[in-house]
Amino acid sequence: MVQVRGRGLFVGINLFDSGHNHGGGDAALIDAGTAQPRVLHGICGEDYFSFAWHKTGTMTPLTGAPVHERRYRLHLENPYPFRESFQLLFGVFAGLQPKSVAFWYQARESAPPGEWLAPDVPWKALGPLGVETPVIGEVSAHAYDTQVPFKDLNQLHEQWQDADMIHGFADLTYLFRHFIFTSSGTGYVAGASHTELVTHVFAPSSRIIDSLFGHDDAIVVSVNGAIIASLPAQQGFSPSAVQLPLRPGWNALHVLVSNDENVDWRWSGLSFAVRTSAARGLRFSTSPPDLTGTNATPARTP
């Protein structure tokens, strides 16, 4: 994974030891801490590296695979610009330890503080769940049976797992592809489904927080059990403004993320940012101390 903060241009990558290129493809996550977060998602690595069926390809100055487990892509003719942050993720099969060398140009000066702040929020995630599976809501150690189409309808046995945001992005596609199917080599992306995300937010005083949720499919946002926003699907990844009413102390934040066909070929994920002026004193934790006692995980500040 490539992770950069600041301004610049991403221009390419060498990838090693990733296994079959249907592992999930490329996902560029751009500018989460701005009013216009963006996602560029390819359908599979074969297209990104300009060859197919896991073979060595024709070498060009910009793309190729000189050997079975090495691939390169330079997009000098169409670099990815970023103003505040940049991440590139590449899907691989479970159990593999890929390596990469990335190339980008970056401005020397650091980006000035912006209006929005993209925190590294720790989430608990449950998914993918079939559209007929009811919303669970509460994190537990239980496992849940569900049916999700992966080309064909498949019976899955799902449990809550960690899904940390990295600078405001939670990439759920890679989370549950690693967890479910890549170990058996099927390589299919989940069809119509949904994923639940739960975290807790500490506020030192009662306040209403301006936030941005980046999404393409429909999402439902709840705070302390009350639905705050039901946001419809949109064509392409774009932000939606949501006001989060927080009481003093810890607050439960629940997001239901749908997933279906879209312009990004069923990529599932979410970005989250809060207005910088309101972020002072906020903390995030999947198990806050006053709810779970002595076994709490450390809270994170934005």
Image (cartoon, rainbow, N blue to C red):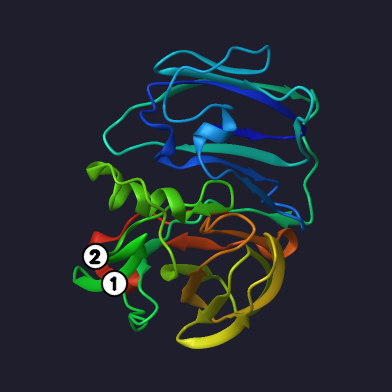
| Mark seen at residue 246 | none
Q: Which residue appears at 30% of the width and 30% of the height?
A: 96
Q: Give neighbour class at mark 1: few <14, some 14-19, many 20+ (Cα, 10 Å).
A: some
| Residue 53 x/y as whole percent | 43, 30
Amino acid type for the residue under numbered disc 2: Leu
| Residue 29 x/y as whole percent | 62, 45
Q: Quadrant of residue 69?
A: top left
Question: Furthest residue to the bottom?
Answer: 226
Amino acid type for the residue under numbered disc 1: Gln
| Residue 243 x/y as whole percent | 67, 78
Quick check: 297 above or below 129? above
Q: Which residue appears at 71% of the width and 62% of the height?
A: 238
Q: Is residue 65 left or right of residue 129?
A: right
Q: Name the residue under label 1.
A: 147
Q: Mark 2 points at which residue?
A: 156
Element type where label 2 sits in the image: strand
Q: Is residue 260 left or right of residue 105?
A: left
Q: Which residue appears at 57% of the width and 35% of the height?
A: 47
| Residue 237 x/y as whole percent | 67, 59
